[in-house]
Image: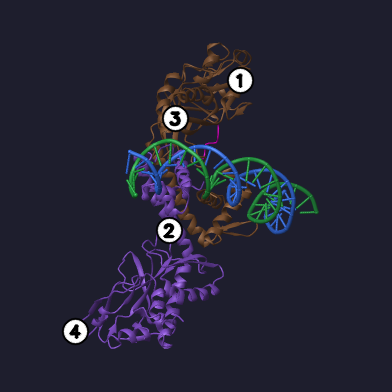
Chain colours: A brown, B purple, C green, D blue
Amino acid sequence: MDKLTSMTVFARVAKAGSFAGGARDLGISRAMATKHVMQLEGYLGTRLFNRTTRSLSLTEVGASYLDRCQQVLEDVEEMEAAVTHLQTEPRGILKISAPQGIGVTHIAPALSEFLKLHPDLAVDMILQGNMSDLVDEGIDMAIHLGAIDDTSMIARKLASSPLAVCGSPAYFERHGIPLTPKDLVNHSCLVNWSIPPRDQWVFKSASGDIRIKVSGRIMANVADPIRVASIEGLGLVMLPRYIVGKAIEKGRLQAVLEDYELQPLEIHVIYPHRKYLSAKVRKFLDFLQVWLPQRIGIDGVE
Amino acid sequence: MDKLTSMTVFARVAKAGSFAGGARDLGISRAMATKHVMQLEGYLGTRLFNRTTRSLSLTEVGASYLDRCQQVLEDVEEMEAAVTHLQTEPRGILKISAPQGIGVTHIAPALSEFLKLHPDLAVDMILQGNMSDLVDEGIDMAIHLGAIDDTSMIARKLASSPLAVCGSPAYFERHGIPLTPKDLVNHSCLVNWSIPPRDQWVFKSASGDIRIKVSGRIMANVADPIRVASIEGLGLVMLPRYIVGKAIEKGRLQAVLEDYELQPLEIHVIYPHRKYLSAKVRKFLDFLQVWLPQRIGIDGVE
DNA sequence: TCTATTGTTTCTGAAAAAGAAACAATTTAT
DNA sequence: ATAAATTGTTTCTTTTTCAGAAACAATAGA
């Protein structure tokens, strides 16, 4: 039984505070979590956990072991990162997380092209993961929309896309066209709460920012449903041009409040702060940096 | 395939300079050595060795990996030592090396008694290994006779035993009894060359040390054959009392040159210099420290 | 009380690990 | 120079191990 794996399991169980939790985190069965830790205990000849049938606590030895364990696991990780850093050709699996909208419209096509250049590379794409724990999930990089606050990561700005407030012509026929941001409070505004600041739409004006708290009958954590709902006439949406561009072009949606400037949506890529960056991450970063600004704004969902 | 094992194999192969050599050192087949390294290479996506069918050299990446590898392996070892250090009860396998003579007469009995006290302990005893590479062989402790020079080890003096020059009455009848050390050059002296200073017998006298270079028809690296040969009348031996005591007592051997003082044979135990000492080593050291001085000198081989 | 969840054990199919033998390539010995 | 030995690797087979499903006892919460 791979000792490093057992150490990982042990550390995770300790962190989660339970075998079941640790097993879930790692995607293995409870049975295996137990076995790994037992193996370790057998090998070391000590209990690492005090188990009282339902609650775990680290033994004194276990606590001491955990410390060093984590250090060793980190070292191994860094060692391997250092090696893959020396590679020039991307290979292995690139695990990338992105919001659904841009993920489908831009990142996936970018990846397709990138994969063609690098035959030894594979991709694991996670759309709309909660992205709270990049490193926990083993994610190499994540696309992030809007403001950045997490400082433990490195963020690089890739592009920005203008936002548009829009609705369907049918909707405007029934409810009228808002002429100032304040009018929005009387409209049904469909919100994509995955892009901060969630249910507030911010307009720029000479007299400072105007924040409008909007609400409507649909909220979603991805852009597509509300784009569709908006076309169906269910309300207004504020979405980036790369999502609604085509719909506006074809007249299915109509932009409003165009005299009021909106803070463009910034598109960042964030990745864990590491001493060594693997070739796959390094090269795809560079690739995106060139590719995305070229494509953003000229496309849109059909 | 256990990654730590693979790392160990890789490090050993690199050290040995060949797969076959590394495999021999580790006691595994050449096939496995290859596989372990290949696995590692596959995982890292780089060659670690440049193999030109018959000669090995580390890749640039391989060299960098080796460094960190060794560090990690050391860390793991220390981590586990730290854990076993916290144990109070000896357990696992105590690997101990000793010269054949004292190994059989004293260390083995001591171990028997010690094992009775500690049910979770097992022993791996190596008699008369060349003991050059204590840590390489994974030996926990070694009994050493005579002067100590290796400083990378910790040595603790356990006891000392007087040496006796003796031969069989039949031998003396035929060749006469040596009256001074110098007479020895005309005698057949059977030498145990595993105890330094090999073929020189050193006597103390008022006018300084007298070193006599002796020679005879039998040399051995263990004491027993020359003890037996001496009893058979084949020559003189210089052996510790705990070996020849009984034979002298029973008249099968006769001590000579008793007016000349011999540097007593010192018995040390040496063990690797480690930050953490396992319970099995710690406790057996203490056990021997008490047990051996009590027994040495009162016994002898039948 | 009943239900859900925990840690562990048992069992079974799948996966792998390890070495023996075979092989080509190459060095060393005779 | 020829033979013998040694090297790294591959193939093949046997044995061992691994991993999860299911079952189980124990416990916490509703």
* Residue beneath disc 2: B78
Q: Earlier in the sequence, mark 2 or mark 4?
A: 2
Task: For label 1, count other residues whose C-alpha is less than 10 Å away and answer few (under 14), some (14-19) or many (20+).
Answer: some
Residue A268, numbered circle: 3
Q: Nearer the viewer, residue A55 or A160?
A: A55
| Helix, strand or loop at mark 1 | helix
Name the amino acid type tagged 1: Val
Pinpoint the chain carrying mark 2.
Answer: B
Q: CA distance from mark 3 to mark 4?
A: 90 Å
Name the amino acid type tagged 3: His
Q: Is residue C30 left or right of residue C7?
A: left
Name the amino acid type tagged 4: Ser
Q: CA distance from mark 3 to mark 2?
A: 43 Å
| Residue A215 percent location from the top left of the image | 59, 27
Pinpoint the chain carrying mark 3.
Answer: A
* Residue beneath disc 4: B207
Task: For label 3, count other residues whose C-alpha is less than 10 Å away and answer few (under 14), some (14-19) or many (20+).
Answer: many
Report the span colored magenta. Answer: A128-133
**Quarter where residue B118 is shown:** bottom right
